[in-house]
């Protein structure tokens, strides 16, 4: 099997984190507002499965064709061949090291024999025998490795040929499946405005407590900003599906593990955690101990929230200041990771600052609502 040498460019990583959620926004809202009939099968979906899961016949199963089962043993054969190929590669590496060591000893004893040292000639003869033996071992290991490479490559070619045939046949397969099963009926979302289908980002979806009826332009704007940021970063989780999918295929099918997939994703999820904190606060989703708080009256709850907000702003203020220091230092030295990928760290450090700003704004929105609610209660 050929090796995959693709390394994700830094510019593609950062632009993908920005553009992918924007495209997802557009697609979700367009689908939510559309009126259409759901079909038993869909050609774009079929081609998507052909592209990402065709090696195990997912596109065939999608169109109710059980000939997709043909792909499964072929793929298992590739995995088996690659497993044996990895073992053979290790044997080749070991045999190469042994051969280099034997050649080094032979050269050393040959030089000693030229200088007339005692028993050097005999040692040189043994070293030559060792070189010959290790050469045979290296040749055998190399032949074994190439054999398993040919096995895996042969089954991969078979899958590639089947996929090429199915790429042409998919429209006909989808049409035949639709004619056989018919349309699935109207989508449940058909005719409904987007606000009824997807959560409205202009305000909390299920705000409870004494401030649920308190709204103003300022709090509404803050809630909308953090609703957008929360929905924006949630689409990053979809990116992780594609990246880890690529990593699994590259590692187990092509014997080419990446040096960027894991690092790029844990950095992305770290930024997601920071930037979604304000959205979680807006939705009252942070973990908190409210054993006593739950039994308080609405007035007491508001007063408690106002008093304890001081601790909230102390913590988030410290996060903002510390995050800014980290970000500034990272920019000054143009910090990159210590891995081979060498991704820039300043955007990750900036997410500390941006996340702190967003959560402070959301805390301010909550404080304003609490103060207004307390005023309305006649405080």
Image (cartoon, helix red, strand yellow):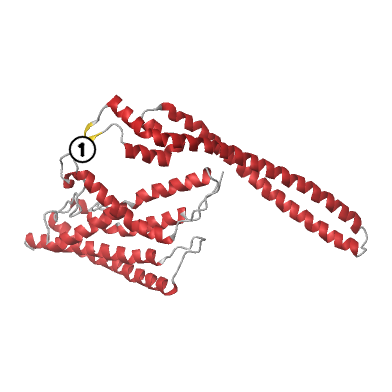
Comparing 81 with 281, the one in front is 81
Considering depth in this image, is 317 or 19 the residue closer to the camera?
Answer: 19
Location of the C terminus by quadrant is: bottom left
Above-or-below relation of 130 to 160: below
Number of on-image labels: 1
Q: Quadrant of the N terminus?
A: top right
Taking 158 as reference, is 141 above or below it? below
Q: Where is mark 1, residue-wise?
A: 36
In percent of width and height, residue 264 lies at 43, 56
Instruction: Determine whether, in the image, residue 379 is placed left or right of residue 68.
Output: left
SS for tag 1? loop
Residue 31, quarter of picture: top left
Asked whether residue 288 appears in the rendered view, the answer is no
Residue 122: image location, x then y, percent: 90, 54
Q: Residue visible at 39% across and 33% down?
A: 169
Q: Image height check: is 98 above or below 84?
A: below
Decide if residue 150 is on the left or right side of residue 250.
Answer: right
Give the image location of residue 324, x and y in percent.
Answer: 34, 71
């Amino acid at each position: 099997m050929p090796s995959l040498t693709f390394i994700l460019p830094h510019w593609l990583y950062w632009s993908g984190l920005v553009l992918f959620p924007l495209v997802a926004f557009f697609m979700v809202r367009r689908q939510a507002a559309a009126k259409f009939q759901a079909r038993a099968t869909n050609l774009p979906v079929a081609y998507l499965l052909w592209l990402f899961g065709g090696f195990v016949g997912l596109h065939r199963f999608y169109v109710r064709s059980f000939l997709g089962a043909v792909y499964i043993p072929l793929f298992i054969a590739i995995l088996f061949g690659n497993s044996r190929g990895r073992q053979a590669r290790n044997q080749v590496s070991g045999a190469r090291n042994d051969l280099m060591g034997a050649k080094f000893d032979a050269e050393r004893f040959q030089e000693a024999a030229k200088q007339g040292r005692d028993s050097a000639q005999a040692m040189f003869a043994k070293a030559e025998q060792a070189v010959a033996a290790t050469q045979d071992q290296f040749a055998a290991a190399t032949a074994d490795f190439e054999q398993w490479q040919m096995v895996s490559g042969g089954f991969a070619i078979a899958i590639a040929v089947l996929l090429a045939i199915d790429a042409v046949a998919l429209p006909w397969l989808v049409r035949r499946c639709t004619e056989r099963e018919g349309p699935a009926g109207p989508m449940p979302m058909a005719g409904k405005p987007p606000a009824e289908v997807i959560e409205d980002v202009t305000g909390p979806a299920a705000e409870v407590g004494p401030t649920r009826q308190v709204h103003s332009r300022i709090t509404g704007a803050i809630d909308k900003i953090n609703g957008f940021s929360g929905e924006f970063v949630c689409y990053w989780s979809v990116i992780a599906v594609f990246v880890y999918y690529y990593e699994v295929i590259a590692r187990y099918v092509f014997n080419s593990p990446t040096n960027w997939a894991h690092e790029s994703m844990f950095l992305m999820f770290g930024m997601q955690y920071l930037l979604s904190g304000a959205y979680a606060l807006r939705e009252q989703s942070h973990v908190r101990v409210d054993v006593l708080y739950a039994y308080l009256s609405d007035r007491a709850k508001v007063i408690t929230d106002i008093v304890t907000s001081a601790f909230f702003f102390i913590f988030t203020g410290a996060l903002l200041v510390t995050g800014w220091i980290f970000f500034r230092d990272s920019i000054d030295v143009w910090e990159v990771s210590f891995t081979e990928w060498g991704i820039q760290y300043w955007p990750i450090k900036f997410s500390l600052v941006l996340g702190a700003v967003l959560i402070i704004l959301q805390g301010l929105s909550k404080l304003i609502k609490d103060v207004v609610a307390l005023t309305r209660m006649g405080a």
